[in-house]
Image: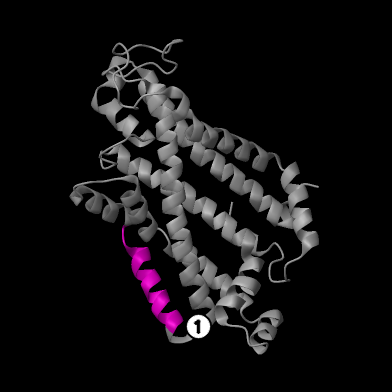
Amino acid sequence: MSLDTAAASGEGQGPSGRRGRDDLRFALRNPKLLAGGTVLAVLLLTGLVGPAFTGGAPNAYVGPQYAPPSGDHWFGTTSFGQDVFTQFVHGLRATFTVGALGGGIAWVLGMAVGFLGGYRGGLLDEFLNMLTNIVLVLPAMVVLIIAAAYLEARGLLVQSLFIGLTTWPWAARAIRAQTFTLAGREFVDLARLSGRRPWRIILREVAPNMYSYLVMSFILLFGGAVLIAAGLDFIGLGPTEGVSLGLMMHHSVAWGALHLGTWWWFVPPGVGITAVVGSLYIANVGLDEVFNPRLREL
């Protein structure tokens, strides 16, 4: 799975309705994309509508302690009598929220820096490239741990913001390289001669010829944000209020679920995180095959 192969899928030839129809046709036939997309859609739907059917707060004490899975408590209960399934569906919602926000912030920053630097060049490109390299060499996880440790109140929005501000550089470098290549093409030169403003040229001429590259970048940033957030939550630096899949695993380990054999407390959140990230990367491999004609299975 590589973003470089997306660039080899024929981009730079101008938007084409026929190509779009071909991509859609191959997408509907690609088993990896269908499998990853289906799992992701089921998990997303569970996270969106599940809390409305579970009722009550995720941390409410609703049952006996350490109760195994049953008809009353599908995923069992915690050491405090909290329903694990209720926490799980709320945790899924938090996972998708931090993935969308954190990955989205990084994606927008990466596109802004990449498009501006690659299209304008010169001193602006040198400055943005220097800024990208500085952020790129910073140990992002260490910065996030230090920032989270000193925040009095932590929430999904703050966590997503810090993740987005520290994970955009690699996307910016990749987008800059492709923009630099496209900026010298004839259809971009014609757009300049017609008097269009630079931002219109970027949005209408350059970006459409990189749509596969941009989509795959967002998927990778989304999955990366989910994993980083889960890591912070697991070490106890997650949201101070609410629940997440990473916090569920943190609490289960802290209260001895491994030693007591209450597997139903830590297995669901672990499987949930794996399923979300795994389905994203499987779908990304499928998109790689769809966008790159050389990888398509005819």
Q: Residues within 10 Å of mark 1 (few under 14, many from 20)?
A: some
Query: Is residue 48 shown left or right of residue 152?
Result: right
Within the magenta stretch, is there residue 137? Answer: yes
Label 1: state its secondary structure.
Answer: loop
Q: Quadrant of residue 63?
A: top left
Residue found 78% across the figure and 48% down from its top: 25
- In this view, the residue in front, 137 or 157, is 157
Relative to 286, say whether 204 is above or below.
Answer: below
Our reading of the magenta stretch's main secondary structure is: helix
Is 19 drawn above or below residue 264 in the view shown?
A: below
How is this picture coloured? Answer: one colour
- Give the side of residue 165 with respect to residue 40, left or right: left
Q: Nearer the viewer, residue 1 or 51?
A: 51
Please provide percent x and percent y for residue 157: 35, 50
Magenta residues span 124-139
Q: Position of residue 143 (x, y in %)?
A: 27, 56
**Closest to the observer, 232 or 75:** 75
- Residue assigned mark 1: 121
- Residue 231 position, x and y percent, is 34, 42
Above/below status of 185 relative to 297: below
Asked if the magenta segment contains residue 246, the reply would be: no
161 horizontally vs 36: left or right: left
Query: Which amino acid does the dot numbered 1 rest on?
Result: Gly
